Image: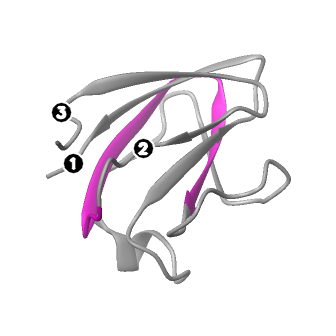
Amino acid sequence: MPRAQHLITLEHNEIAELTRNDVTAITFHCIVGEVHIIRSNSEPDVNDSGWLYRRGEGERNIALADLSSAPGTRVWAIGRAIASEVLVDHA
């Protein structure tokens, strides 16, 4: 089942999958803190880097190919602040 405006809360260095299945596009918004966003088919390592999004930043209906040139049909977030929140929505 896709996530529809689902709020995900992350602690520092916590990893969460923003997608629940394979997707081709995603919408997300960092509400609190900051997160690294990573495109990958498997769970990344906590030390991996991705695109950094801070409070107030995000993407609207971005194709995964435009989000990152990395392979994969899943999107992950790693919390980089003491507490981070990401609102995610995808088809």
> Label 2 near label 1: C-beta < 8 Å?
yes
Q: Which residues are magenta?
A: 22-38
Marks 1/2: CA–CA distance: 9 Å
**Predominant SS of the magenta segment:** strand
Q: From the image, which quarter does the N terminus lie in?
A: top left
Asked whether the beta carbons under mark 2 and mark 3 sit within 8 Å of each other, the answer is: no
Q: CA distance from mark 3 to mark 1?
A: 6 Å
Mark 3 nearby-residue class (10 Å; few <14, some 14–19, many ≥20)? few
Q: What amino acid is labelled 2 in the image? A: Leu
Q: Earlier in the sequence, mark 3 or mark 1?
A: 3
Residue placed at 61% from the left, 56% from the top? 43
Q: Tell me which residue sits at (85%, 53%) in the image.
A: 47
Identify the image quadrant of residue 84: top right
- The reply to whether residue 61 is in sight is no
Label 2 belongs to which residue? 18
- Tell me, yes or no, if residue 1 can be seen here: yes
Residue 4 placement (x, y as % from top left): 18, 33
* Helix, strand or loop for disc 1: loop
Amino acid type of the residue that numbered disc 3 sits on in the rendered structure: Ala
Q: Which mark is residue 90?
A: 1
Where disc 2 sits, the SS reads loop
- Residue 9, percent from left and from top: 53, 19
In this picture, residue 9 sits left or right of residue 27: right
Residue located beneath label 3 in the image: 4
Return the x and y of residue 74 as percentages of the image width and height. Answer: 42, 62
